[in-house]
Image (cartoon, rainbow, N blue to C red):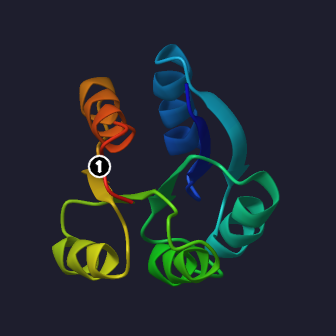
Amino acid sequence: MAKIMIVDDAGVIRAILKKYLVAGGHQIVYQATNGLEAVSGYIEHKPDLVTMDMSMPDMGGIPALKKIMAYDPKAKVIMVSAIDQKDLVVEALAAGAIHYIVKPVTEHKVVEIIGEVLKPNKLG
């Protein structure tokens, strides 16, 4: 199916997302723990899709999103946010994120949003 990069500073979130995505038939090509790793990982691995945490050390999700979008305006990035980060979600969508998932993540929600984003007719 899709080559996906998971970006989150929390190992447990990366493990949960990986479990859901692999069960859905996707390949995890890279995992990053901060925005700096995400940008270099995107350039190196050229994933079909990125899940990006909002709040991380060194470089947060929105600055990393902006750098990835500057490198590849067609990048598909789904932001992963806490429930109280609505303003950041709006900012991320304005910066080019294609969708968002609110923590705590559930398998149903992850599969639903990934499927929607990967539809051939989805803009991005």
Q: Which quadrant, please, contains the C terminus?
A: bottom left
Residue at image position (55%, 24%) is 1
Q: Secondary structure at mark 1?
A: loop
* Number of numbered discs overlaid on the protein picture: 1
In the image as oriented, which residue stretches furthest toward the front? 121
Q: Is residue 10 shown above or below 25?
A: below
Viewer-nearest residue: 98 or 124: 124
Viewer-nearest residue: 101 or 16: 101
- Residue 92: which quarter of the image? bottom left
Q: Is residue 46 shown above or below 26?
A: below
Residue 89: where, in percent of width, then height?
25, 71
Residue at image position (76%, 65%) is 43
Viewer-nearest residue: 80 or 66: 66
Viewer-nearest residue: 124 or 52: 124
Residue 48: where, in percent of width, then height?
57, 46
Residue at image position (33%, 32%) is 115
Query: Given the image, on which type of amino acid does mark 1 rest?
Result: Lys
- Say few, some or many: other residues with alpha carbon within 10 Å of mark 1 (under 14 / 14 to 19 / 20 or more): few
Residue topped by disc 1: 103
Residue at image position (77%, 69%) is 40
Side of 91 relative to 1 (left or right): left
Residue 113: where, in percent of width, then height?
28, 39
Residue 75: where, in percent of width, then height?
52, 62
